[in-house]
Amino acid sequence: MKKFNILVFDDHPLVGVAIKATLSLMSCVDSISSVYSFRSALDVIKNKNINFVILDINLSDGDGYDFYRRIKSHGYQGKVLFYSAEESSLYSKLAFKSGADGYVCKSEHQEILRDAVEGISNGYTFFKFKSDKSGYENEEQVTLSNREAMVMSHLLNGKTNKDIGQLLKISDKTVSTYKKRLFDKYSVNNLVELIKVVNV
């Protein structure tokens, strides 16, 4: 079995410690490094033989999708598993479309994380998609940018424009612009209609 040198990138140190403890005894794991910043993560990937990255989506100095694009542009060809507190199916599908190998929600049992790592290490992907077709088909026909998807997920979770602006480090006005784009793309007039169409 191929052995993996894993990098855990999460800006909450305790999460990194927990993931290392969860995965350390797996037969497919050779080593595990844990970092908390973009720069440290880039340095570890550059200087160590990292071939499996476990990556949070919401990071204090950027988002995980941006980081993934950056390491791919620098030649990284290893495995990537997104690991986030976000339960919206939007994030899972966006991870899938980005070319990642899997997506796991932090609220799930640690066995799910181990299953995901084992499956990915054996050449499989690990994604959970909503099976309810009433909203899925409409959602699949709409193409969203990474930022639009993040704004949408926060809106669906009840966040205000101000909350979203603070979380994503953008202005309220910019959030309003993304919100209008989402309404236009889904042909709705308000958030209630958007929730019904997306059916998350």
Image (cartoon, rainbow, N blue to C red):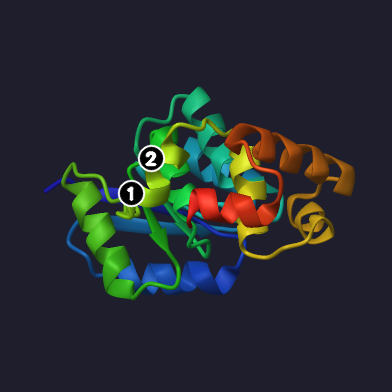
Give the secondary structure at mark 2.
helix
At a point 46% along the width and 41% down the height, the residue shown is 139
* Residue 97 sits above or below residue 155 on the image: above
At a point 17% along the width and 61% down the height, the residue shown is 27
Residue 133 is at least partly visible in this image:
yes
Residue 151, horizontal then vertical, whole percent: 67, 48
Most foreground residue, 147 or 43: 147
Residue 124, horizontal then vertical, whole percent: 20, 44
- Residue furthest to the left: 1
CA–CA distance in space, label 2 to label 1: 6 Å
Q: Residues within 10 Å of mark 1 (few under 14, many from 20)?
A: few
Pointer 2 with pointer 1, Cβ within 8 A? yes
Kind of residue at disc 2: Glu
Most foreground residue, 63 or 177: 177
Give the image quarter of residue 154.
Answer: bottom right
In the rendering, which numbered label is found on residue 137?
2
Give the secondary structure at mark 1.
helix
Residue 29 is at least partly visible in this image:
no
Residue bearing the label numbered 1:
133
Residue 67, horizontal then vertical, whole percent: 57, 39
Left or right: residue 174 versus residue 127 is: right
* Residue 13 sits above or below residue 120 on the image: below
Left or right: residue 164 versus residue 113 is: right
Left or right: residue 26 versus residue 71 is: left
Most foreground residue, 125 or 7: 125
* Residue 61 sits above or below residue 141 on the image: below
